[in-house]
Image (cartoon, rainbow, N blue to C red):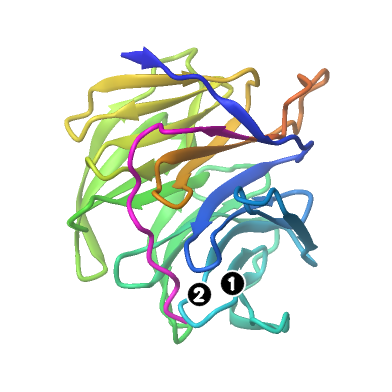
Amino acid sequence: MTTTPYEVAVRAEAELGEGPTWDAAAGRLLWIDVLGCRVHTYDPATGRRTVRRTEQHVGAVKPRAGGGLVLNLRDGIGLLDPDGGFRWLHREPVPGRRANDAAIAPDGALWAGTMRYDEAPGGGTLSRVTGEGTAEVVLDDVAVSNGTGWSPDGRLMYYIDSPTRRVDVFDHVDGRISGRRTLAAIEEGAGFPDGLTVDAEGCVWVALWQGSAVRRYTPGGELDRVIELPVPLVTACAFGGPGLTDLYITTARTGLTEPPALAGSLFVVPGAGKGLAQPAFAG
């Protein structure tokens, strides 16, 4: 087990930085500030950054196959067209509930999570949303829906409901999941599992909220790497860069009375491993 050095990619003060995603077509990283209602882009080749404000809390942003972005928003799934225009794909507002993490499955569907603002058990969901806007609730007994990802062959889906302190794994066939079981349990005092990403070796990288770290677990559930960070609220991670070898990590500062100087920044670990090419949303 090794500890890998990090760098600061973007020094920021995101209230709840989340959801790093490599947009291969544009050669840039997408990430968000959930509570700050902001979508960020970062081009590591040039250092260019952009910020776009959303009208409500945003849980995730992903690229679309035809250009533009899909957004997991408080009141449902929205589309940003390449010309900057916005429209709803699936709108389903629920009082007291907001969007959280989301991921694109191998078939191009968006698996979008929700949670209650008070984090009440059973108040959140995980839904599968097609490019046509059809939404199906897959899991309906969730507290804080977070990291979701697939094995390199697409036959396994990994999932985190943060308060459980577990990384779970399902069998995945044609958009259906079954056989839920535990891949790894996070011990007391090590934080709560948040976002995740899967690498080309099938290992699962897990960000630890209140844990100041990212961990890598093998497909057999063994902990084999740890990246320690100088901030407590580590939220999500994803591979990016031209060769998908750099691990980008988002962090937060919400609720901290004396946040460390780098809390809310975007970090990167160059050459951390080899990521999987991520599909774009088929809508």
Q: In which quarter of the image is residue 274?
A: top left
Point out the image quarter for the N terminus.
Answer: top left
Mark 2 and mark 1 residues within 8 Å of each other at the beta carbon: yes
| Element type where label 2 sits in the image | loop
**Label 2 crowd bin: few (<14), some (14–19), many (20+), radius 10 Å:** many
The mark nearer the N terminus, 2 or 1, is 2
Q: Name the residue under label 2.
A: 64
Query: Gap between marks 2 and 1, in whole Å?
Result: 5 Å
The residue that appears at 30% across and 40% down in the rendered structure is 168
Three-letter amino acid code at disc 1? Leu
Q: Position of residue 83 (x, y in %)?
A: 70, 84
Q: Where is residue 50 in the image (x, y as percent from the top left)?
A: 75, 58
The residue that appears at 61% across and 45% down in the rendered structure is 18
Magenta stretch: includes residue 177: no
Residue at the bottom extreme, as displayed? 132
Three-letter amino acid code at disc 2? Arg
In the image, is residue 74 above or below residue 207?
below
Q: Mark 1 points at which residue?
A: 69
In the image, is residue 50 above or below residue 252?
below
The residues colored magenta run 267-283
Number of marks in picture: 2
Q: Position of residue 260 (x, y in %)?
A: 76, 19
Q: Is residue 273 left or right of residue 30?
A: left
Magenta stretch: includes residue 282: yes
